[in-house]
Structure formats: C-alpha cells, structure tokens
Amino acid sequence: MNYKNKKVLNSTLLYFMLIITSLIFILPVYWIFIKAVNGPVGIFAYPPDIWPKQFSMANFKNAFTHFDLIQNFVNTGKILLFALTGATISSAIVGYGFARLRFPGRNLLFMIVIASILIPWDVRIIPQFMVFSKLGWINTYLPLVVPLWFGYPFYIFIFRQFIMQIPYELDESAIIDGCHRWSIFINIILPLLKAPIITVLVLEFVRSWNDFLDPLIFLNTSSKYTLSLGIYYMITPYNMDWGAVMAAASVAVLFPVLTFFFLQKYLLGGLTFDGLKG
C-alpha cells in the first residue's frame, strides 16, 4: 500500500469514527426534539417516527401550563447570574496571582489547586453539606453560588495559562510608571482576557445550567427548584405526561447548545494569546 492510499484509508477511518461518535451524542437529543413536537399521542407511536408526522406545540403548552417551569427558569437564571459573575471575577484574580506574583510555595499551592479537580463529588459533598448546614444555608441558593466566589480550579488554570503568555514587559513598564498590581490587572491585563473570560462564562453557564445533584442535595422547597430539578420531578409514577417532559427537556437542551454554537471559537482558542494589536 503506497503512502497516498494509506493516507486515504486513515482519513476514511477517522471520519467514520467521528460520524459514529457524533451520532451517539446527537441521536438522543434529536429524539427528544422529535417527540416534543410530535404531539401528545405521537410519543407512543410504534414503530417510532424518525421524522415527526405532525408539528404540534401541545406538549410545550402542557409543560408550561401544568408545571412550574417558568419559576424553574427564573430560579436557574438567578443562580446563573451570581455563579457566572463570581466564578469569572474570582478565578481571573487568582489566576493573575499565580501567573504574575512571586511568593514562597506558589507552584506547590497551584498544584494543590489543580489537584483538587480530581476530588470526586461524592467525597466533598458530605463535608460541604455539614458545613452549609451549620451555617444555615440549606434550602437556599448560597451553597450553589458562594463557593464559586472563591475561584474554581479549572477556571483558575485557564486564566493562569493565558496570562502566562502575556509579555511580562507590560507589567514592568506599568510598574516603572508607578502603577500598583491591582491597577495593572484592571487596566492592562483584564482588557486582554476577552477570550478566557468568554471561555469561562460558557463553561460555567453549561455547568450551572446542567447542575442537578447539588440543587437536589441543598434545595427542598419546590418554589426554589432549578430547571433540572423541575424536569426531574415532572416524572411521577401516576399520570405521567411524557410529551411535556420531552418538551421541557428540549428547551433545557436548547440553551447550552446555542451558547456553544455561537461561542465555540472562543472555547477553542481560550488558552491562546494572539498577541497585541497596534
């Protein structure tokens, strides 16, 4: 087999694997949308419909009429507002500190922060619940928001790696002109962090939007449920409305998909500093 044929074969196998992998992820989402718009009865059609025989909004009407999805959306929006703000601001500041400040044990402390990513959720949730219970934070949004205001390990890593690529000469010039560290961060470094900021915003949006276990543990009042919890409690042993569940799930899936679609270029380049203009 010559080089050209081998290259064609490798490319064919690669694209075949990409198509199979894409279908594995796309088909469940496609199935949700099909069943959501196929009407209340179409969900039970056999054999299953590959394409909807009718386009009906009845399932969406039932979902938003018979369940508290509007309130669930509002609750999720509140959490997102504070989570996005806290995670971005705190992680950017901590990332700048690890990238620019020189202090004893800096590298060791950074490794500890990164290693904390490896701690399983099952291990940390019990001590977290005990602490938040002592503070009286159970059945509030504080456990879902406050920890993010102290930085998120992976986001700290993103900011730190990006800032490390920014020439330190910018800091030195500012120091010579009499600027202090906080002024350097606000006026010089922060305007250059557009790519990692958008990357962190997208990642945190998807994480908080899809978060299910933390709200399930800390929230116990239906009026405070997030969207993921609201959809979960739509599933009951009696009078099950699968069409409404599919409609609610399709709306829940739509927002992260659109967010990623429009901002994917920042996700792919969020760790790369492209240089200075002018």
Image (cartoon, rainbow, N blue to C red):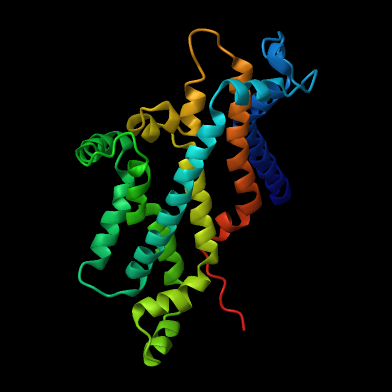
The quadrant of the rendering that contains the N terminus is: top right
Q: Who is closer to the viewer here, 75 or 37?
A: 75
The quadrant of the rendering that contains the C terminus is: bottom right
Q: Quadrant of residue 214?
A: top left
Above or below residue 16? Residue 147 is below
Residue 156, position as x, y percentages in the image: 38, 59
Q: Who is closer to the viewer here, 261 or 38?
A: 38
Above or below residue 169? Residue 107 is above
Residue 24, position as x, y percentages in the image: 60, 30
Residue 242 at least partly seen: yes
Above or below residue 21? Residue 63 is above
Q: Quadrant of residue 11?
A: top right
- Whether residue 104 sits left or right of residue 238 in the image: it is left
- Whether residue 24 sits left or right of residue 82 in the image: it is right
Residue farthest toward the bottom in the current orientation of the protein: 177
Residue 111, position as x, y percentages in the image: 28, 58
